[in-house]
Amino acid sequence: MSKEKFNYFIKTEKNNWEVIIGLEVHAQVISNSKLFSGSSTKFGGQPNTQVSLVDSAFPGMLPVINKYCIEQAIKTGLGLNAKINLLSIFDRKNYFYADLPAGYQISQYKNPIVGEGSVTLDMPYGTKVVGIERLHLEQDAGKSIHDLSPDNTYVDLNRSGVALMEIVSKPDLRSPEEVNSYVKKLRTIMRYLGTCDGNMQEGSLRADVNVSVRKKGEKKLGTRCEIKNVNSIRFMEMAIESEANRQVEILESGKKIDQETRLFDTKKNETRSMRSKEEAHDYRYFPDPDLLPLEIEQSFVDNLKKNLPELPDQKKDRFIKDFKLSSYEANVLVSDNNISQYFEDVIKNSDIKLAKNWIIVELFAVLNKKNLDIKNSPVSSNNLAKLINSISSGEISGKIAKQVFELMVNTGDDPSKIIKEKGLKQQSDPNELEKIVKIVLDKNTDKVQQFKSGKEKLYGFFVGEIMKASSGKANPKLVNDILKKELKK
Ligand code: MN
């Protein structure tokens, strides 16, 4: 969020308004095949090449539930500390649209597979628990393509029938920042679980954002508007801000909010009305007669629970306890499974304190600048561990290490090779260093006199000259020891 925008929220807060936000996140399940058919879910295929007769709703075709998608939904539910419902029901949600060939979406209405749960956020002002209302499974629709021809709309059914998890939060979020943190946390949890890749550019994660405002201290929720299908976190933040401010303006002028579905125009940075809000009964939900109620054994759930990977919150606690990291450091390192893995690989054979700083400060700066993922880091975990060991052993100084690191980034080379080839090894021979110290002091007899008569600031000057004379390679600790001794003479 830019500062300017953040201030605008402060302004509405000054007038004592509070923003209430709830999210319906649609997360695409990681699965090779669709929820009720065997066709591929691979992204980027030629239009209509991944469509079975079920997905295109040919008469008489019957859906068959994909057991793997059920497992994925349960795992996600467990990751959200949620209740798993052993009985759930698939319903038809009826509506007409060209990219929905059946005329209904198979979804779950009254009996979702996952019930109430929670997600914990780390905000600058402390932790915040956001309630999860439910998670249900449903099919994705196809895609209408309007921009290929001025006269025609085309339909691509590759997405039709792909499994989605709709994760509904309680209206517990209070600011764009909290929404940012919530979506990122959900994404991290699902990536750890391997249940959703969270790739927003490919549409694997998108959200309907419900926004309302009310005067602070008020118990009743205001009339909400739902902003449909927002596909980036940045856009969610912008949409919430502009929608909240729109509502405040309406209410402050004495008018009322109409409950409606709105779209966020990313170019104009405003929401606009799409349709008046439909009610659940408009969809004529009813249990899909082609599908039996879904009954799950408790042992099936228990087994999945037993095999769950370590989740971000658990990993964070372990990092703080075992590696003495701060909460901030632990948060940064567990935010991505690949980053935490990299960190753990590095500290297998090197100093933890140096490792965390090198990763969080130096490595992240490089990755950010080069727009790279940790998986494509030019510096392997093995090479970073070697570099850190060269510092710990005194082979190179921390300052020289930065030079070596830069060369590692550019070449991908092993640090020991770089240190050897460039002659960067730290000068740690006391006799050699003594010679250099003496030369520097002899050259500056006047300053030595001044130092001895009380101008102690000059100490730094001598160190600087000695480092320069050794091309930055002198072992700073030894230089200190020798210099102090020589100056006392
Ligand atoms: Mn939905």
Image (spheres, rainbow, N blue to C red):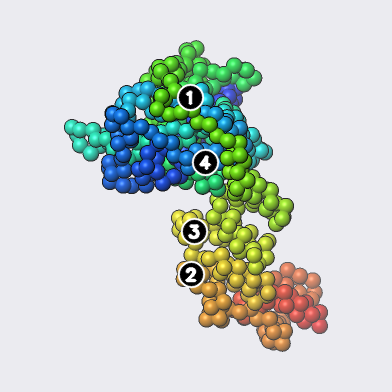
The numbered mark, 3 or 1, whose residue comes first in the sequence reads 1
The numbered mark, 3 or 2, whose residue comes first in the sequence reads 3
Q: Residues within 10 Å of mark 2 (few under 14, many from 20)?
A: some
Front tag of 2 and 4: 4
Q: Position of residue 412 (x, y in %)?
A: 48, 69
Whether 426 is drawn above or below 385: the answer is below
**How far apart are labels 4 and 3 at the CA level?**
27 Å
Q: Position of residue 50 (x, y in %)?
A: 31, 43
The numbered mark, 4 or 3, whose residue comes first in the sequence reads 4
Q: Position of residue 456 (x, y in %)?
A: 76, 70
**Circle 2: element type:** loop
The residue drawn where x is 35% and y is 39% is 159
Residue to which mark 1 is pinned: 109
Within 8 Å of ligand 1, the CB of disc 4? Answer: no
Residue to which mark 2 is pinned: 412
**How far apart are labels 2 and 4 at the CA level?**
40 Å
Closer to us: 449 or 466: 466
Residue to which mark 3 is pinned: 375
Mark drawn on residue 71: 4
The reply to whether the C-beta atoms of the residues labelled 3 and 1 are less than 8 Å apart is no
The numbered mark, 1 or 2, whose residue comes first in the sequence reads 1
The amino acid at mark 4 is: Glu
Q: Residues within 10 Å of mark 4 (few under 14, many from 20)?
A: some
Within 8 Å of ligand 1, the CB of disc 3? Answer: no
Closer to us: 408 or 55: 55
